[in-house]
Amino acid sequence: MSTPLKLNTRSQVGGNRRKQTFRFCELCGKEFGPLNHLSLRFCSRKCVYAAKRGQPSGKKGRTYPHLQRARIGICPICGKEFRAVKDFSTSSHTRIQKYCSKACWSVRGHKTCAHCGKIFGAKDGSGKKYCSKRCAVADMVGSKSPAWKDGKWRERAKMRLSWPFRRWINAVLARDNFRCRHCGATQNLHAHHIIPFSENQFLGLDIDNGITLCVYCHSKVHGRWVGFCKQPKPYKDVPGAMHAA
């Protein structure tokens, strides 16, 4: 417990024409002065260090839980708990510390390539999985391809080039009087499988499994452009295709 403040104002007048102030050291009781600042409490550094001995000094590398009031956060990079001492909030701006250190901050958004295992930089929240287009092309084959169905594309391609398939198309169109069953169009007609060939290949040449659709209605059913020519403007801007908008 520190001793009460003791000031001794002498009648001596210094060079600045002010009274000189002296104080008694809080540790050894020695009088010292004249004081340049009234905040001085000890007569020497030796007394300062002796008074602070046994008290937390706040040195680097030491932790003092009773002095830590900052929020406890979890680093999204290394998963370590840390004190978010850099959080601050004002009337117009709020900043929240997300990373425990600058090392974790510098590798934020880095991902591992799904093909070669190389670490690459990517923006937070992006769905990027590969470090380059070469890795994406090399990895997205077979069942990993977004266009993968069942691996029987050779059988379907062979079936589409056969004469029985051409006769099936003509039979479906003739049954529907060469008119789209959805909008009634008579041009750019396709024969569409009601049950896809990838789900049941035995119904690939069944006339009852076919329906006549124009290219716009056929594209709307599949959710993509299925015409042989280049995709035109949006369907609502194509004359006679307002039905497919």
Image: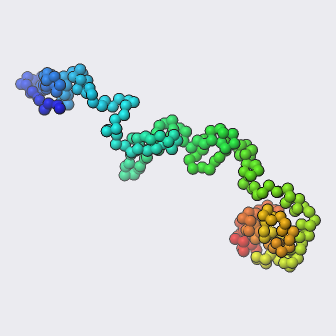
Q: Name the image quarter holding the N terminus.
A: top left
Q: How is the image coloured?
A: rainbow
Task: For residue 224, say whether it is visible.
Answer: yes
Picture layout, residue 75 above or below residue 166:
above
Q: Residue at x 92, y 67 (%)?
A: 164
Along the line of sight, the residue nearer the viewer: 11 or 8: 8
- In the figure, is residue 103 to the left or right of 131? left
Task: For residue 35, say whether it is visible.
Answer: no
**Hey, which residue is sitting farthest left in the picture?**
11
Picture layout, residue 169 above or below residue 80:
below
- In the figure, is residue 207 to the left or right of 70? right
Q: Residue at x 74, y 72 (%)?
A: 241
Total marks in image: 0
Q: Position of residue 32 (x, y in %)?
A: 15, 22
- In the figure, is residue 33 to the left or right of 171? left
Kindly indicate the quadrant of the structure image that contains residue 146. Answer: bottom right
Q: Position of residue 119 (x, y in %)?
A: 62, 38
Along the line of sight, the residue nearer the viewer: 90 or 60: 60
Picture layout, residue 18 above or below residue 74:
above
Q: Residue at x 72, y 64 (%)?
A: 223
Q: Position of residue 136 (x, y in %)?
A: 71, 46
Q: Position of residue 159 (x, y in %)?
A: 88, 62
Q: Residue at x 47, y 37 (%)?
A: 101
Kindly indicate the quadrant of the structure image that contains residue 245. Answer: bottom right
